Amino acid sequence: MKKEWPVWEVFIRSKAGLDHRHAGSIHAADARMAIENARDVYTRRQEGVSIWVVPSKEIVASDPEQSGELFEPAKDKIYRHPTFYDLPDELKHM
Amino acid sequence: MQLNTEDLEREFQAKIDSGRNIEPKDWMPEKYRKTHIRQISQHAHSEVVGMLPEGNWITRAPSLKRKVTLLAKVQDEGGHGLYLYSAAETLGISRDELYEQLHSGKAKYSSIFNYPAVTWADMGAVGWLVDGAAIMNQVMLTRTSFGPYARAMVRICKEESFHQRQGYEIMLTLCQGTEAQKRMAQDALNRWWWPSLMMFGPKDEESTHTEQAMKWRIKLKTNDDLRQQFVDQTVPQVKILGLTVPDPDLKWNESRGSYDFGAINWEEFWNVVAGNGPCNKERLAARKAAHDNGAWVREAAMAYAEKKETLKEAV
């Protein structure tokens, strides 16, 4: 019986010191093949020094329909930003 | 709060109008989803079928430099197909279904690949003209409304520029060579010029999807606008090569600041789309054979992975 290879999400660190970033996805039978396929598909021009692969079905995502409840409470909390505070111009190093 | 479809559609349109992108899990009209599956998969199929005319020349490339270049280009096209299939899959269609649509003829791919690549100069003309026309369309699509498609386009555009440059370099080398080599370059230009102009699709007044596609920011320019841009950009490149555009009606129009060009043979275009181009059957057969002959490898890899998984659980 034919069965499709599972989908993996690919994350790539472009150089040491930077975060891994989502690059795209790939089909592969197992984790090792996923790394190899990700290498071939997403780093043909030295785009990475490290790859993470995660089975797509293991990703838990927030629901876009609930983005209001999730993210809007932060909107009116401008006092969390440094520019909220009014300080004299002659003040240095702050 | 439950919104009705009309409200959702209004909100959706407002989002697009304000320049925001649509992501896979966002609400979208069914037609937007279907149109994207069709367009993205057609684009993916074009990348994959596009490997065939060039693959034929890898073993016949005239030097090691040309050979490694062509290999890299063909490998890029395979990669571009994969980026695009992944983008289409975010809309809820499986990879197997996408392949099935290609192999059964339900899904189309760019008609340009149904023309044969008969001389080495065709590798030059294809990279220069065909990739050039594709890039023009793809640069526009980096600003398309569907996030995964736009992101795939950014990646593709970054990689594709070398495809066009290496093609032009092949033409340049031939044009600086012997008389016979120059004739070969002119012959390739003669055969690829008109099919390349056809790549932008039917004339605006005959393009049924354009209005909706512009409204949803699937397209940002019309077929005719892109075609004109291509002609204006390419004619000076033809002059540098010292070749002649195979169009007696081509001339600079001072008042428009653009080139006027002759009528396109749309009968030929529709005939190739309908499956009667010189290579339609050959391309599809090669594609299907590759898929069918690789089936045992895909199945064996899956069986091996499942067996390893079972053994791990048993420990």
Image (cartoon, rainbow, N blue to C red):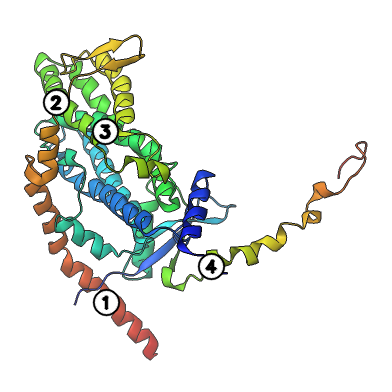
Mark 2 residue type:
Ala
Name the disc covering residue B304, or none. 1
The chain identifier of the residue carrying mark 1 reads B
Which circle's residue, 2 or 1, is located before the other in the chain? 2
- In three-dimensional space, the C-alpha distance between marks 4 and 1, rounded to whole angstroms, equals 35 Å
> Viewer-nearest of labels 2 and 1?
2
Amino acid, disc 3: Glu
Between B271 and B313, the one lying in front of the other is: B271
Do the residues marked 2 and 1 share a common chain?
yes
Find residue A59 and name its label. none
Residue placed under numbered mark 4 in the picture: A63
Tell which subunit mark 3 falls on.
Answer: B
Residue type indicated by callout 4: Asp
**Which residue is the site of mark 2?**
B188
Density class for disc 4 (Cα within 10 Å; few <14, some 14-19, many ≥20) is few
The quarter holding residue B187 reads top left
